[in-house]
Image (cartoon, grey):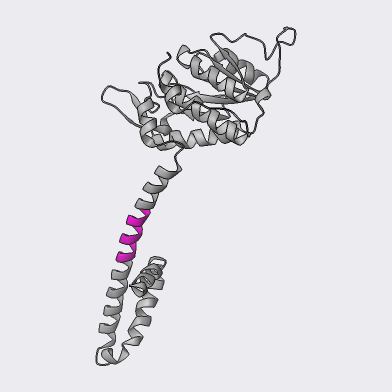
Amino acid sequence: MIKKKTEKNIEEKMSEKELEKAAEAESTKTKEKLVEKSIEEKKKELLEKAKKLKEKVEETTTEELKEKVKVKKKTDMLIPLEEYVKSGIYLGTKVVTPAMKPFVYRRRADGLAIFNTDLIDEKLKESIEYLSKFNPEDVILVCKRQAGWRAAEKFSELTGIRVFTKKYPAGILTNTDLEDFFETELTIVTDSWLDKNALNDTINVNKKVLMICDTNNFAKGANQIIIGNNKSPRSLGLIFFLLAKGYCKAKKIEAEIPDLEWWTGEEK
């Protein structure tokens, strides 16, 4: 069995030319049996053997690769796939902007665009890494959408990142004459449509933007994006949960982060 396994592994690593050479080498071991055969018969036999070996390698490699990819997706995700589905983060809108089109998997019968969950996870990982480059005092989170207020405020409490819900005071990043003027390095924008004042101010002072984008958002001005439903409390709760968890871990901030159910559940 060990010998067969070793031979199989060797075959899997071979190119077409290497397979032909291997078949030829194998034939020399049975030279006595082929003495009476013509050169053409020998050549034909070797080529057929090489072809069979190649087909076997391709079939085995493809199946094993599929299985490895499947397992890797499950183990590498920030949270189990079913949690993404339960939160509704994959549900987009009926409008899809050119910037979001590459992330859309398909459309439902009712016209809603559906995000690719693998890409949602990938963008969240990238965003956690990106956010972790900044200190809490150099970041602000803006969330005018009421559905995200509860999760956004908890995110702020855990990370030390300043948050603006309900209303963003226009000019606080651009007008040095204002008493509450301050400087920041990064603005997290929950929805570019609702939070356009904060987005425009950040761009005007040449600072960075981390933007949550639904299918109907334009990513213009963003340095890093998170893709997903930015209109649902469950979806926004999941996003802020993962950002808080990843950021606190990266910055070694000791914080008691509520479990996912708190972030995606209804406010009591």
Q: Was residue 133 drawn as part of the magenta stretch in this picture?
A: no
Indicate the quadrant containing the C terminus: top left, top right, bottom left or bottom right: top left
Query: Is 46 left, or right, of 161 in this rendering?
Result: left
Quarter of image, res 138: top right
Q: Position of residue 267 (x, y in %)?
A: 43, 14
Front-lying residue, 46 or 254: 254
State the quadrant of the N terminus. Answer: bottom left
Per the image, is 58 magenta? yes
Q: Is residue 219 visible?
A: no
Question: In the picture shown, does residue 24 fall above or below 110?
Answer: below
Q: Please, is residue 81 above or below residue 166 in the view?
A: below
What span is colored magenta in the figure? 56-65
Q: Camera-side residue: 146 or 221? A: 146
Residue that lies at the very extreme toward the front in this rendered image = 256
Tell me: 176 left or right of 91: right
State the residue at coordinates (29%, 92%). Answer: 32
Q: Nearer the viewer, residue 153 or 45?
A: 153
Q: Give me the residue at 67% from left, 11% from top.
A: 172
Q: Residue 35, position in %: x, y?
A: 28, 92
Magenta span: chief secondary structure? helix
Picture residue at 55% right of the left edge, 22% below the top: 155
Seen in the image, is 140 located left or right of residue 39? Answer: right
